[in-house]
Amino acid sequence: MASAIAVLVLIAALVSAYWWTDLQNKGVRPRAMRTSASVDQVAEAFDAAVAGMGWKVVDPSNPRIAQSPLLSGIRQRIAMTYGRNPDGRLSVVIAPIRISKKGLLFRRPTKAHTLRMRMNGFERRVTQVDPLVQILDPSSEPDLAQALSSIRTIS
């Protein structure tokens, strides 16, 4: 009986560890959106939401990159790239480009909470600027997938 309880506890621990890792990985996934806001408005939203509280913009061009301070331990980076569509709307992709992972069995991202909060804050700011913004899956659209692959080559 005791061994059955121990096995159930072990299974519950493994399932919860897997669930927690999956939750953290989903939080730091790349985000994409199409908006009618201007480049300056999107850049201001990025600076306000991502590059604050110790973080700073280290590359203001396209892609725009914000980085955490070295004093916080493991340095993290978030990049935003943008481009105009033929219909005149702005396609924006934001993704973490420097992310560390830890763990033996389940490789979960470190400081995922900070990255998720900053990227969610950016989405909220763009939504405030343009309420008709479309939030998309970056891998579903060819132009957004290309922008995402260009971000991933930066790190």
Image: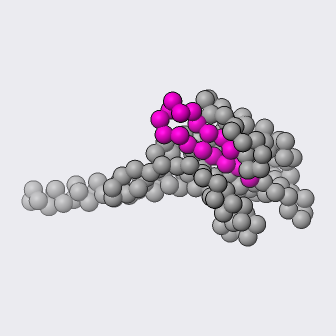
- State left or right for residue 19 relative to residue 134: left
Residue toward you, 60 or 32: 60
Residue toward you, 106 or 146: 146
Quadrant occupied by the N terminus: bottom left
* Residue at 60% over, 44% down: 77
Write down the quadrant of residue 118 in the picture.
Answer: top right
The image position of residue 32, as x and y in percent, is 70, 57
Q: Can the viewer see residue 49?
A: no
Q: Is residue 53 above or below residue 106?
A: above
Q: Is residue 36 above or below residue 57?
A: below
The image position of residue 71, as x and y in percent, is 51, 30
Which span is picked out in magenta? 65-81
Residue toward you, 50 or 27: 50
- State left or right for residue 138 relative to residue 42: left
Q: Can the viewer see residue 44?
A: yes
Residue toward you, 1 or 13: 13
Q: How is the image coloured?
A: one colour
Residue extending farthest left = 1
Q: Is residue 103 magenta?
A: no
How many tags in the picture?
A: 0
* Residue at 82% over, 57% down: 83
* Residue at 23% over, 57% down: 10
The image position of residue 9, as x and y in percent, is 22, 55
Q: Is residue 73 magenta?
A: yes
- State left or right for residue 64 relative to residue 108: right
Write down the quadrant of residue 5 in the picture.
Answer: bottom left
